[in-house]
Image (cartoon, helix red, strand yellow):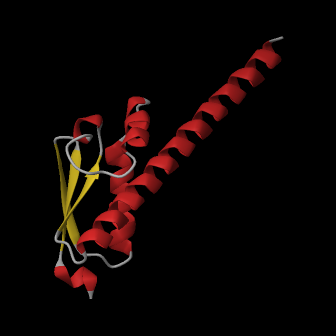
Amino acid sequence: MELKNYLRHEYVAKRRHGDQKMLEDQLFDIMQINLAHQLHDKGHYNRLYLPIDMEALGCDDFVMEPELYHLFNLGIDGQKIAEKLIHLMRRNGWKLNYYCEDGQMFIDVEEKSYE
């Protein structure tokens, strides 16, 4: 009986971790869509914005706000996911700095990044 309970506990723990990872991946995708939307609308843009918390929703025109609200409500860490995206952008040659305020990440992009 103990083995059965242990295996069930392990299954539930792995399932929760998998669900959390899936939700983080979904937030990562939505953040990419928001950046692409901003770049498409504004071309070479010196400041980009990402929502990292519910506090930012409704302030700007973020794409897929209901989905963002749902993910933040579930406790997905928006700053952690946004920093992962920043890391990938830097690895791909983007020159940028960022800071977080009022539930948003402000990303200052150097002009060299667009060359």
| Residue ID at (22%, 69%) | 96
Residue 33 visible in image: yes
| Residue ID at (28%, 69%) | 41
Indicate whether 38 appears above or below 15.
below
Residue 76 visible in image: no
Residue found at the very far bottom of the displayed protein: 115
Place residue 91 in its image quadrant.
bottom left
Q: Nearer the viewer, residue 114 or 99?
A: 114
Total labels: the figure holds 0
Query: Residue 53: image x %, image y %?
Result: 29, 39
| Residue ID at (26%, 83%) | 114
In this picture, residue 6 sits left or right of residue 44: right
Residue found at the very far top of the displayed protein: 1
Query: Residue 54: image x %, image y %?
Result: 29, 35
Q: Nearer the viewer, residue 10 or 41?
A: 41
In this picture, residue 109 sits left or right of residue 71: left
Query: Residue 72: image x %, image y %?
Result: 38, 35
Quarter of the rendering occupied by the C terminus: bottom left
Query: Residue 21: image x %, image y %?
Result: 54, 43
Indicate whether 71 appears above or below 97.
above
Place residue 7 in its image quadrant.
top right
Quarter of the rendering occupied by the N terminus: top right
Q: Nearer the viewer, residue 93 or 32?
A: 32
